[in-house]
Each structure stands twice: as structure tokens, then as C-alpha cells.
């Protein structure tokens, strides 16, 4: 049973920073890409960024330059560093685990991820 637990969300002023963490358990973490998604009220869940098993990263255009993703395989943890936060970044942020090991590219489709955390709320005030 794979479990993903996010932490690090909270309330921050516009322009501030947050670092989200996601701890995984239940399978060989290092073999799989990990993704970060977010869902704002009334909107669909969207891809934010991801990191492959080779540590290659990919970010959505809306956050490129402001977010950085990293992973520590020794700690089974993936991180999402968010800088220069904007009110429109307000959402519940979820981490997810790729369904396939050793995938060459970071996929952006929700359907390619088969395990999800419960999410952590990020609220950016103006």
C-alpha cells in the first residue's frame, strides 16, 4: 500500500515563499516520477510540476521560474519550493506518484498517476 503525505502548506502573503514536502512509503520511491498538482476552489486539478526518477524536472508554464522541485530518495521525500507566490496560487496542493517506473519523461496527465496524497492547503493573501 503506497501512502503519500504532504505537509508545509499554510497562509503566506503575496511575494512570500513556502516549501511543501511529500513523504512516500510502500514501494521503491526512487524508481518512480513524482508529480505536484493543485486544485483551486471551483477549478479542475492541474499539473504544477514533476520530477522523474532521473531527477529531471518539468514545470507548468504558469509557475515556471517561481517553483522548484527536488527529491531526496534517501528520505523518500519530494519537495516543492514555491517563491514569489501570488494570490492565484491559492489551492490545495497534492503530490502524486507515477503509475509506471523508470518513465523517461515527466507526464502531466492526472490519469498517469495512481497514488495521491490528501493534499495541503496553500493560501496566498494579497
Image (cartoon, grey):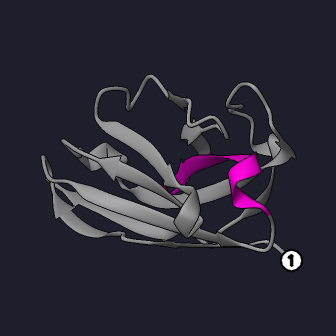
Residue bearing mark 1: 1
Residue 124's spot in the image, x, y percent?
24, 57
The answer to whether residue 55 is seen in the rendering is yes
Q: In this picture, which residue range is highlighted in magenta?
A: 28-45
**Quarter of the rendering occupied by the N terminus:** bottom right
User: In the rendered view, would you say 37 is above or below 60?
Assistant: below
Q: Position of residue 12 (x, y in %)?
A: 19, 63
Place of residue 57 in the rendered image (x, y in percent of width and height, measured from the top left): 53, 31
Instruction: Judge from the rendering whether residue 67 lies leftward or rightward of residue 106; answer left or right.
Output: left
The one nearer the camera, 119 or 70, is: 70
Which residue is at the far front? 74
Nearer to me, 2 or 61: 2
Q: Is residue 121 magenta?
A: no
Circle 1 packing at 10 Å, graded few (<14), some (14-19), many (20+), is: few
Q: Which residue is painted at 75% across and 43% down in the image?
A: 110
The percent coordinates of residue 104 (x first, y second) are 75, 25
Quarter of the image for residue 4 reads bottom right
Establish if 121 lies above or below 81: below
Helix, strand or loop at disc 1?
A: loop
Amino acid at each position: 500500500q503506497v501512502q503519500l503525505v504532504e505537509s508545509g502548506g499554510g497562509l503566506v502573503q503575496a511575494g512570500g515563499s513556502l516549501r511543501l514536502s511529500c513523504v512516500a512509503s510502500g514501494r521503491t520511491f526512487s524508481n518512480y516520477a513524482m508529480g505536484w498538482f493543485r486544485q483551486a476552489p471551483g477549478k479542475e486539478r492541474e499539473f504544477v510540476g514533476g520530477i522523474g526518477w532521473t531527477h529531471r524536472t518539468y514545470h507548468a508554464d504558469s509557475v515556471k521560474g517561481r517553483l522548484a522541485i527536488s527529491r531526496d530518495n534517501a528520505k523518500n521525500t519530494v519537495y516543492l519550493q514555491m517563491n514569489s507566490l501570488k494570490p492565484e496560487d491559492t489551492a490545495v496542493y497534492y503530490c502524486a506518484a507515477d503509475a509506471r517506473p523508470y518513465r523517461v519523461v515527466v507526464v502531466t496527465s492526472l490519469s498517469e498517476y495512481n497514488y495521491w496524497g490528501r493534499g495541503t492547503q496553500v493560501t496566498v493573501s494579497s
